[in-house]
Image (cartoon, grey):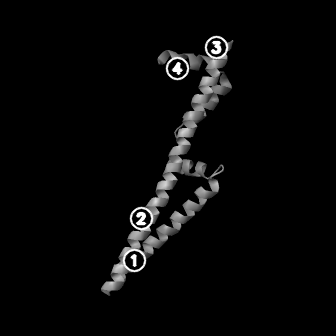
Amino acid sequence: MADTDDMIADALDADDREFLESLEEDRGLFRQIGDSWKGPMGGWAKLIFAFTTALGMLLLFTIWQVAHTREPVEHTLWAISALAVLVLMGFAKEWMFARLNMLTILREVKRLQVQVALLSEQKED
């Protein structure tokens, strides 16, 4: 396996090395979220982010209501509402993190495609 990696590294010119190095740098969570807002699904990612933010504020409100209600029926309804909002928020975040993982995998696949293409060019020469 190391021989293949060495052959790929030898096949790269300066521009290709720079491109691959840009792909290899670690990206933080906020940069990944910003990257998910681009592309064909960017609008959906922005919508889910806004939806999750609104759900977070609604969750805080429902928790406040649970803490300040005295009547048992009202207290129970607010508690059930808080749990429902929490579940919805979990689903929205799961979608967002699944998208982030997909984009990370696509980034790695693109990196491998470039390396294989460069290696095949070297073998043709």
**Considering depth in this image, is 89 or 23 the residue closer to the camera?**
89
Tell me the residue that label 1 is attached to.
Answer: 64
User: In this view, which residue lies farthest toward the left?
Assistant: 72
- Which numbered disc, 1 or 2, marks the residue that appears first in the sequence? 1
Callout 2: SS: helix
x 57%, y 38%: residue: 107
Mark 1 or 4 closer to N-term?
Answer: 4
Neighbourhood count class around disc 2 (C-alpha, 10 Å): few under 14, some 14–19, many 20 upward: few
Alpha carbon separation for disc pair 1 and 3: 67 Å
Please state which amino acid type lies under the numbered disc 3.
Lys
Name the residue rendered at 46%, 65% in the picture. Answer: 88
Q: Which mark is residue 87?
A: 2
In the image: residue 64, left or right of residue 5: left
* Residue 62: quadrant of the picture: bottom left
Q: Callout 1: helix, strand or loop?
A: helix
Q: Are marks 1 and 4 in contact (CB under 8 Å)?
A: no
- Spatial CA distance of label 4 from label 3 is 14 Å
Picture coordinates of residue 4, whole percent (x, y): 52, 17
Tell me if label 4 and label 2 are in contact, CB under 8 Å: no
> What amino acid is at disc 1?
Trp
Residue at the image position 61 percent from the left and 19 percent from the top:
119
Circle 2: residue type: Val
CA gap, disc 2 and disc 3: 54 Å
Q: Nearer the viewer, mark 1 or mark 3?
A: 3
Q: Which mark is residue 123?
A: 3
Residue at image coords 44%, 69%: 85
Q: Which residue is mark 4?
A: 5
Of pointers 4 and 2, the one earlier in the residue sequence = 4
x and y percentages locating residue 39 in the rendered image: 65, 49
Quadrant for the C terminus in the image: top right
Which one is in front in this view, the residue at disc 1 or the one at disc 2?
A: 2
Q: Is residue 101 visible?
A: yes
